Image (tube, rainbow, N blue to C red):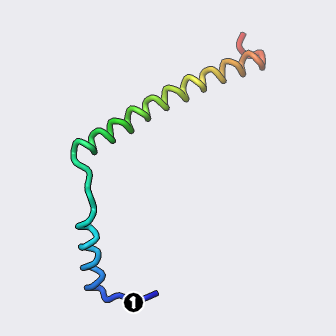
Amino acid sequence: MAKVHPVLFLRQVRQEVGKVVWPTRKETMMSTLMVVMFTVCATLFFFVVDQIIAYVMKLILGLGG
């Protein structure tokens, strides 16, 4: 691995960070909202599936009275 002088390395890092296209506040908020909505939907889906499986298992095992 090539040795790079620390000062040169920091200059290169600064240069690369300058090339980064950062998301706008609106894009960040929309992405966050989408993640939260997906999480809520997935939570509800898995809750319903879990309840159905639990009900079916109780019926199969005869514990559903």
Location of residue 52 with respect to 33 vertically, above or below: above
Whether 18 is drawn above or below 26: the answer is below
Quadrant for residue 18, please give it: bottom left
Residue at point 45%, 29% (across, down): 41
SS of the residue at dot 1?
loop
Query: Looking at this rendering, what residue extends furthest in the right direction?
Result: 61
The image shows residue 30, relative to residue 60, as above or below, that is below
Q: Residue sitting at 27 percent across and 43 percent down?
A: 27
Q: How many marks?
A: 1
Query: Residue 31 in the image: x percent, y percent?
Result: 33, 41
Q: Residue at x 77, y 18 (%)?
A: 60
Q: Give the image location of residue 21, x and y in percent.
A: 26, 58
Residue 23 as seen in the image, left or right of residue 50? left
Q: Which residue is mark 1?
A: 3
Relative to the observer, which residue lies in front, 20 or 62? 20
Q: Position of residue 56 (x, y in %)?
A: 70, 19
The residue furthest top is: 65
Q: Residues within 10 Å of mark 1 (few under 14, many from 20)?
A: few
Quarter of the rendering occupied by the C terminus? top right
Q: Amino acid at mark 1?
A: Lys
Q: Is residue 36 left or right of residue 64?
A: left
Decide: is 32 above or below 18.
above
62 sits left or right of 44 in the view: right
Please identify the quarter of the rendering in which residue 53 is found: top right
The residue lying at 26 percent from left, 67 percent from top is 17
